Amino acid sequence: MDKAGSPARRQEEAAQDKPAPRKRGPKVDVELTRQRRADITREAANLFDKVGYHRVNMEMIAEAAGLKKPTLYHYVAGKEEILFRMQESMMLPLRERLNERIAAGMDTMSILRGIYEDIFRNLHDSPGTVRSFFEHQRDVGPEREAEIRKQRVEFTAQVMKIISDGMDAGIINRADVRLMTLCFFGVANWAYQWYRPGRDPEPEVIAGQCFDIFARGMAARPAG
């Protein structure tokens, strides 16, 4: 057995005191993967918007994202998966923000106005993603299309309930709830065809303008 002051003992103590080498934990890899996929999705959305979904191939997406084609396939399986991620990146935040407003106890009209603000903000920040969301839902494949449709139906049902509750409270004029909800979405959902950042007002401004037109109606009210 080594004595306390022997060279072998000192080497053993030094080894024990030396901090263990830092390992690259899974959290780092997960974050890197998340960021890379977000970059790929963003660049693909720009290509889909400019060139058209069916004209874009994976080699073009890899070049736009600054990746080699084999590396691209490390993060995504193909165009359908990228398109599905775009669909999710639209639906999930819309539903989250709606739930946040409801949980915060915001009034009915502020909640509905907020939906317009969210949609126009998406149009401003990610026009290619919005266009792909509306025009290529069926291109993600049957199973993924069913999942996105389920999310859209649930989101629409939430808004229908908000409008219905507003009618019950006397805040919104009584009418066919489903039809009013579809008209409510129609104003904002069609905007991807005409809204142009830089030419049109900022998202929150034009969202408020469109919401006021929808909420107040076109016809002038007689005095008194």
Image: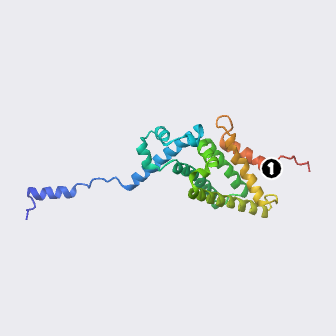
- In the image, taking residue 27 as reference, residue 111 lies left or right, namely right
Instruction: Classify mark 1: helix, strand or loop.
Output: helix
Q: What's the residue type where badge 1 is placed?
A: Arg
Q: Quadrant of residue 105?
A: bottom right
- In the image, taking residue 46 as reference, residue 9 lies left or right, namely left
Say if 145 sits above or below 121 in the image: below
Q: Position of residue 140 (x, y in %)?
A: 57, 52
Q: Residue at x 70, y 58 (%)?
A: 159
Q: Residue at x 80, y 61 (%)?
A: 170
Q: Quadrant of residue 198?
A: top right
Q: Position of residue 131 (x, y in %)?
A: 63, 44
Q: 10 Å neighbourhood of mark 1: few (<14), some, or many (≥20)?
A: few
Q: Position of residue 71 (x, y in %)?
A: 41, 45
Q: Which color scheme does this rendered protein use? A: rainbow
- In the image, taking residue 74 as reference, residue 149 lies left or right, namely right
Total number of numbered discs in the rendering: 1
Q: Residue at x 38, y 55 (%)?
A: 26
Looking at this view, name the residue that lies furthest to the top.
199
Given residues 183 and 116, the one toward you in this image is 183
Q: Position of residue 33 (x, y in %)?
A: 44, 50
Q: Residue at x 18, y 55 (%)?
A: 14
Given residues 197 and 189, the one toward you in this image is 189
Where the N terminus falls, by quadrant?
bottom left
Mark 1 = which residue?
A: 216
- In the image, taking residue 190 as reference, residue 23 lies left or right, namely left
